[in-house]
C-alpha cells in the first residue's frame, strides 16, 4: 500500500494553498496527523510537538544501554536514506546522519553537485527522482525555496513515493531546526513551569534567517508566548512573519535595542547575519550590527532562568565568554537536534508506538 500523501490534487492547486491547509496532504496515511513529507513548520501543532518530544526522550533513554541501542538499530535497518545537501551544512547534515544511524538506516549522500550528474546538466528534479530509486527517504537542503515541496508532490505522484525531509530551503523554512529549538525550550522550562507565558527574543538577521521563520510559527502553538524581534531595520523580519502572528493573536514587539529587552527575556535566540544572500557582495557588511551581539554585558542582564539559544554556526554574535554559563543552551540544542530528528524519522516510518511501547 502506498503511504505517501500528496495525491489527488494538482501541483498548481497544492502550491497555491495557504501553508496550514497543506498539512493534511502531507500527512502519513493511516497515522494520527504526523507528517509523511516534512516541509513546513505549519505541519506541527502542540500535541504533535509534544509527542515528538516524548519520543525523543524515549530514544535518548533507550540509546544509553547496549540492548536499547541495538534494538533501536534494528527498527529501520531495512531502510536507506539519502542526504542531499547542495548548501553548506555541518550540524544539520551530521545530526540527520547520526539520527539515521541510531535507527539503523543506511545512508548515502550528495554534498557537492559538481561531482554528481547535475554537473552534466541533469535537472535537480531528475536527480531527486534518481535518489528515490535507491533510497527510502530523502533528507534535503537546497538554496531553492520550494524545491522540497515540488519534489514531494512529484514523488508522491510517482511509483516510488518516498518521504522528503526539508533540512533547510532557501531563506524560507527550516522545520527540523525549529523542532529541535522547541524541544530545547520544552526541556529548559520543564521543571520551571513549562513553555507558556514566556518572552522569546529573536536577534540578528530576522529577514533571511529561515530558522527564525519556522520557530516563530511553532511558538504560536504554545499559550501566551510573546515574541520580540530585535534587528537592524534592514534585517528586520518582514510583514509575512508579523501577519502570521497577528492572525493567531500572538503578542509581539519590534525593537532595535537588545539590551533593553534582555532583562525581560526567558529565551534569547541569536542568529548570524546571512550574508550569503546579499544582492551584491559586501552589502551586509555596510549595516551596523554592533548592537545586535550578545556578550558579557547582555549576560549580566539576562534573568537567572533565561536561556541563550543559537541555531549555529555563530560568528561573533555570541561572545565565547558566554559559553560556559549554565544559561548557554546552544551546545545542548545541537545534541537535541540528533534526538528529535531520530524521533521524526521514526515517526515518519510509523514506528512511534513501537518505540514508546518498548519497556525501559
Ligand atoms: C542555520 C541554517 O542553515 O539556516 N544553521 C543550521 O541549520 N543550524 C542557521 C545559519 O546558517 O545561520
Image (spheres, grey):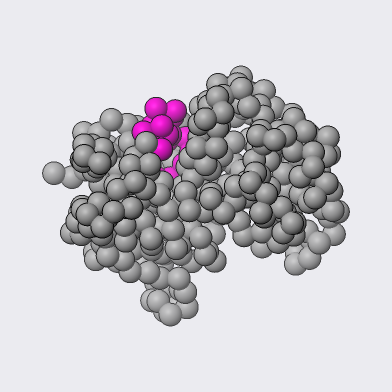
* Residue 338 pos. (x, y %): 42, 53
Q: Quadrant of residue 36?
A: top left
- The correct choice, above or below, for 88 with respect to 63 in the image is below
Q: Is residue 175 visible?
A: no
From the viewer's perspective, is 233 left or right of 210?
A: right
* Residue 245 pos. (x, y %): 62, 27
From the viewer's perspective, is 338 left or right of 27?
A: right
- The correct choice, above or below, for 289 with respect to 212 in the image is below
From the viewer's perspective, is 107 left or right of 121?
A: left
From the viewer's perspective, is 319 left or right of 177?
A: right
* Quadrant, the N terminus: top left
* Residue 109 pos. (x, y %): 37, 69
Query: Does residue 208 belong to the magenta stretch?
Result: no
The boundaries of the magenta stretch are 38-53
Task: Identify which residue is drawn at 76% across, 49% down.
Answer: 294
Q: Is residue 15 visible?
A: yes
Amino acid at each position: 500500500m502506498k503511504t505517501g500523501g500528496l495525491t489527488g490534487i494538482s501541483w498548481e492547486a497544492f502550491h497555491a494553498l495557504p501553508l496550514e491547509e497543506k498539512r493534511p496532504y502531507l500527512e502519513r496515511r493511516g497515522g494520527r496527523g504526523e507528517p509523511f513529507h516534512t516541509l513546513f513548520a505549519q505541519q506541527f501543532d502542540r500535541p504533535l510537538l509534544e509527542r515528538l518530544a516524548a519520543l525523543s526522550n524515549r530514544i535518548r533513554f533507550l540509546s544509553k544501554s547496549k540492548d536499547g541501542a541495538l534494538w533501536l538499530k534494528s527498527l529501520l535497518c531495512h531502510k536507506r536514506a539519502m542526504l542531499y545537501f547542495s548548501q553548506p551544512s555541518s550540524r544539520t547534515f551530521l545530526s540527520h546522519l547520526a539520527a539515521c544511524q541510531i535507527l539503523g538506516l543506511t545512508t548515502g549522500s550528495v554534498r557537492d553537485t559538481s561531482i554528481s550528474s547535475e554537473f552534466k546538466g541533469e535537472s535537480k528534479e531528475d536527480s531527486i527522482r534518481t535518489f528515490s530509486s535507491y533510497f527510502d527517504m530523502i533528507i534535503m537542503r537546497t538554496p531553492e525555496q520550494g524545491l522540497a515541496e515540488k519534489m514531494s508532490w512529484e514523488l508522491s505522484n510517482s511509483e516510488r513515493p518516498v518521504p522528503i525531509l526539508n533540512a533547510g530551503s532557501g531563506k524560507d523554512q527550516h522545520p527540523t531546526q525549529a523542532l529541535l529549538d522547541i524541544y530545547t525550550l520544552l526541556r529548559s522550562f520543564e521543571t520551571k513551569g513549562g513553555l507558556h507565558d514566556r518572552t522569546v527574543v529573536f536577534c540578528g538577521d530576522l529577514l533571511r534567517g529561515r530558522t527564525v521563520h519556522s520557530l516563530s510559527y511553532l511558538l504560536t502553538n504554545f499559550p501566551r508566548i510573546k515574541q520580540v524581534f530585535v534587528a537592524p531595520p534592514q534585517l528586520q523580519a518582514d510583514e509575512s512573519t508579523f501577519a502570521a502572528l497577528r492572525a493567531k493573536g500572538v503578542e509581539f514587539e519590534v525593537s532595535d535595542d537588545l539590551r533593553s529587552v534582555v532583562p525581560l527575556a526567558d529565551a534569547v535566540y541569536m542568529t548570524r547575519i546571512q550574508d550569503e544572500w546579499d544582492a551584491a557582495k559586501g552589502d551586509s557588511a555596510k549595516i551596523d550590527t554592533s548592537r545586535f551581539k550578545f556578550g558579557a554585558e547582555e549576560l549580566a542582564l539576562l534573568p537567572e532562568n533565561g536561556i541563550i539559544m543559537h541555531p549555529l554556526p555563530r560568528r561573533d554574535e555570541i561572545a565565547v565568554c558566554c559559553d560556559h554559563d549554565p544559561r548557554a543552551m546552544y551546545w545542548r540544542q545541537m545534541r537535541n537536534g540528533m534526538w528529535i530528528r531520530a524521533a521524526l524519522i521514526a515517526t515518519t516510518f510509523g514506528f512511534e508506538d513501537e518505540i514508546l511501547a518498548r519497556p525501559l
